[in-house]
Amino acid sequence: MNPCPECLPTQKCVPRRAAFTLIELMIVIAVIAIIAAIAVPSLLNARMAANEASAISTMRTLVTVNEQYRTRFGSYPGGLTNLWAEGYIDSTVADPYKAGYTFTYTGAGTTYFCNGDPTNPGTSGTRYFFADHSGVIRFSTTGTATSASPPIDG
């Protein structure tokens, strides 16, 4: 007697293999898409916040080492390469492109100023940063920050 009612008595009964139906696969894909739609914007915002935190840290470093350089040599350096050559900063800070930001530095004598602008505004960062010989780091959300921009908190 053949245990499977669908098979003919002369056939060998082959058990059905368990498989996912098309509906089940579509539900799994929909759930993954929903999770991705929730996670990707958060990931991008976290990356942007990390880039901005790195830019602020770089600006703080530049403010500090500029004062150290002025104390030692009597004037501010003419460029980031001077700070690097004297060992005040490493090559990652001397590179004008860092963590989604572009840094520009101008200095000589008794003044300097430095700007940190997002390389891709809105993607790598939303705030623009500025620091000068006053030691105050300032920001702008609408374009290049200046000495008239508000200071960052803390």
Image (cartoon, rainbow, N blue to C red):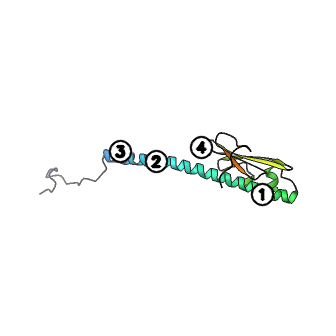
Badge 3: residue crowd in 10 Å (few <14, some 14–19, many ≥20): few
Q: Which amino acid does label 4 sit on?
A: Thr
In 3D space, how far apart are the residues under numbered discs 4 and 1 (Cα atoms)? 29 Å
As helix, strand or loop, the secondary structure at mark 2 comes to helix
Between residue 56 and residue 19, name the one nearer to us. 56
Q: What residue type is labelled 1?
A: Val
User: Which residue has dot 3 on it?
Assistant: 26
Q: Can residue 78 be seen in this view?
A: no
x then y, percent, for residue 153? 65, 53
* Residue at x 80% of width, y 52% of height: 81
In 3D space, how far apart are the residues under numbered discs 4 and 3 (Cα atoms)? 32 Å
Badge 2: residue crowd in 10 Å (few <14, some 14–19, many ≥20): few
User: Which residue has dot 1 on it?
Assistant: 65
As helix, strand or loop, the secondary structure at mark 4 comes to loop
Q: Which amino acid does label 3 sit on?
A: Met
User: Which residue has dot 2 on it?
Assistant: 38
Q: Which of marks 4 and 3 is nearer the N terminus?
A: 3
